[in-house]
Image: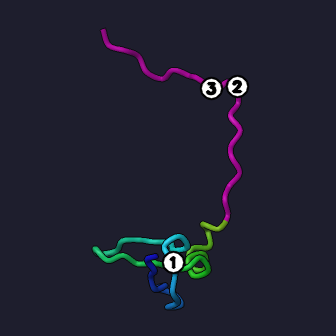
Amino acid sequence: MMSYTCEGCYGEVTLDQAFLRSINLRTLAWCRDCWFERHPELGIIPQQRKVAASETAARRWTTRR
């Protein structure tokens, strides 16, 4: 199995555990701990928004004839 080196802690990261980004045509990898340390705002997943009945299926465009 392919493995990468974490850019934060320089530890070995497997493909299924890595957060990968391509920067300047170079693939960079981060382990889970280093990724969320660098991006704390991504650790919180917002709740799904409830759609009111009035907002559903509103047609906002017309066809040309």
Q: Quadrant of the C terminus?
A: top left
Q: Secondary structure at mark 3?
A: loop
Contact check, label 2 and label 3, Cβ < 8 Å = yes
Looking at the rendering, the stretch of residues picked out in magenta corresponds to 44-65
Coloring applied to the structure: rainbow
Is 3 located above or below residue 47 in the figure?
A: below
Name the outermost residue toward the left: 25
Amino acid type of disc 1?
Answer: Thr
Instruction: Give the image location of residue 5, x and y in percent.
Output: 46, 86
Give the residue type at disc 3: Thr
Q: Which mark is residue 14?
A: 1
On screen, residue 51 versus residue 23, left or right, reads right
Q: Report crowding for label 1: few under 14, some 14 to 19, many 20 or more residues within 10 A (C-alpha).
A: some
Residue at 67% across / 64% down in the picture? Answer: 44
Judge from the rendering whether residue 21 lies leftward or rightward of residue 8; answer left or right. left
Q: Position of residue 61 (x, y in %)?
A: 43, 21
Residue assigned mark 3: 56
The answer to whether residue 11 is above or below residue 23 is below
Q: Which residue is mark 2?
A: 53
Residue 63 drawn above or below residue 21: above
Say which residue appears at 70% left-offset and 25% top-offset. Answer: 53
In the image, what residue occupies the spot 55% across and 79% down?
31
